[in-house]
């Protein structure tokens, strides 16, 4: 089930522990979210597959914030083709 249709610019990104760790910049393709620049001026990308909910005008992901920040990418993820 794809939750990407409910992801909008400016939505906070909430980790599995309930804390905000990023803000959505925009959808990048159909399988990833580009996050707003961090304090160092760097964009990051996370896969939509991490998203567990898009309730209450926020995006919730399946991992703690610290892990998410270790796992995110600084370059766009390759677009996956449907099989």
Image (tube, helix red, strand yellow):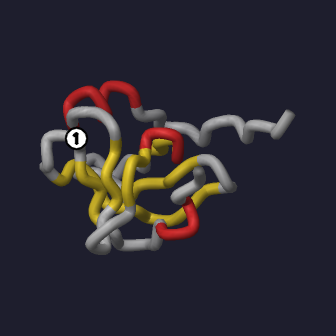
x then y, percent, for residue 45: 48, 44
x then y, percent, for residue 56: 27, 72
Q: Hey, which residue is sitting farthest right in the picture?
A: 83
Residue under the image location 42 percent in, 47 percent down: 51
Please determine whether, in this image, residue 39 is positioned above or below residue 27: above
Q: Residue 14 versus residue 24: which sits nearer the camera?
A: 14
Residue under the image location 51 percent in, 53 percent down: 33
x then y, percent, for residue 3: 52, 58
Please determine whether, in this image, residue 51 is positioned above or below residue 23: above
Please determine whether, in this image, residue 64 is positioned above or below residue 57: above
Q: Residue 1 versus residue 37: which sits nearer the camera?
A: 1
Could you tell me which quadrant the C terminus lies in? top right
Instruction: Name the element at disc 1.
Output: loop
The crowding category of the residue bearing disc 1, from other C-alpha atoms within 10 Å (few below 14, some 14 to 19, many at least 20), is some
Please determine whether, in this image, residue 51 is positioned above or below residue 78: below
Residue under the image location 39 percent in, 48 percent down: 52
Q: Which residue is mark 1?
A: 16
Q: Residue 64 versus residue 38: which sits nearer the camera?
A: 64
Residue under the image location 47 percent in, 37 percent down: 74
x then y, percent, for residue 17: 14, 41
Give the mark count. 1
- As drawn, is 72 to the left or to the right of 81? left
Q: Residue 43 versus residue 8: which sits nearer the camera?
A: 8
- As drawn, is 53 to the left or to the right of 21? right
């Amino acid at each position: 089930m794809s939750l990407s249709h409910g992801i909008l610019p400016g939505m906070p990104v909430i980790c599995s522990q309930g804390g905000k760790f990023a803000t959505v910049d925009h959808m990048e393709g159909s399988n990833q979210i580009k996050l707003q620049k961090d304090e160092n001026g760097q964009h990051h990308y996370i896969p939509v597959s991490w998203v567990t909910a898009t309730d209450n005008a926020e995006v919730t992901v399946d991992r703690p914030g610290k892990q998410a920040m270790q796992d995110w990418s600084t370059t766009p993820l390759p677009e996956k083709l449907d099989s």
